[in-house]
Image (spheres, rainbow, N blue to C red):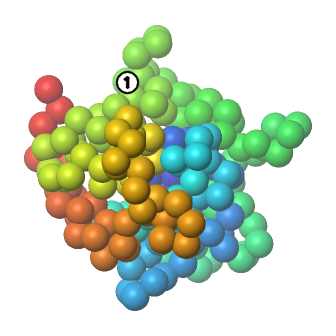
Amino acid sequence: MKFGTLLATYQGVRREDFANATVSDVSVVDGMMVLTVYQGKTEASRRRFVLHSAIVDAGFAAYVGSRHPDSPLFDVSADKSGNRSDHAGSTLNRWLELIGIKREDETSWHSFRHSWKTVARHYIPHEGTADYLSGSANGSESRKYGTKGKHKGFPLVTLKQNIDLIPADIAEWPLD
């Protein structure tokens, strides 16, 4: 689940965005690693996005290559309905408790998302791009233009340029 945690840290993804993904949801397009979310929590979360270079540099391609193409992307057990996201959250919470940084009702999977949104405001100049990368719905009707049909989302190269504006060294992040 190392890479699930990295996805939360560097991409601001919900646990639902990755926990139910399969290996075949990951692809390489024009040299960029892409994850397509088909089973996201909301309509906005169903998208394809380019991975931050820190995730790629941590060995994500080798990890994906080591798994069977039809298998889940991560080894997280499913509940009775086949959903893996709740178990991903409880696994992370146990890890946070083990290393001593779990605070009741304050530190959770969603904490990563909130931190990412804070960091994105400092580094990604276009709020719509940051919202798309994290799978957040936007409140502006005009920001919905170009988000449906075969041209849904942003060009991958634009997403790559923006996601990599966030420093790989989290010590540089303004988390105040």
Against 17, is 151 above or below? below
Quadrant assignment, res 100 = top left
Quadrant assignment, res 90 = top right
Kindly identify the amino acid type of the residue bearing the numbered disc 1.
Ile
Q: Residue furthest right?
A: 80
Q: Residue at x 77, y 72 (%)?
A: 70
Q: Residue at x 37, y 24 (%)?
A: 101
Estimate the x, y position of residue 92 in percent, counting from the top left: 53, 35
CA neighbours of label 1 inside 10 A, class few (<14), some (14 to 19), many (20+): few
Front in this rendered view, residue 113 or 104:
113
Estimate the x, y position of residue 107 in percent, counting from the top left: 41, 22
Estimate the x, y position of residue 164 in percent, counting from the top left: 23, 64
Front in this rendered view, residue 3 or 114:
114
Against 121, is 11 above or below? below
Placement of the C terminus among the 4 image quadrants:
top left
What residue does disc 1 label? 101
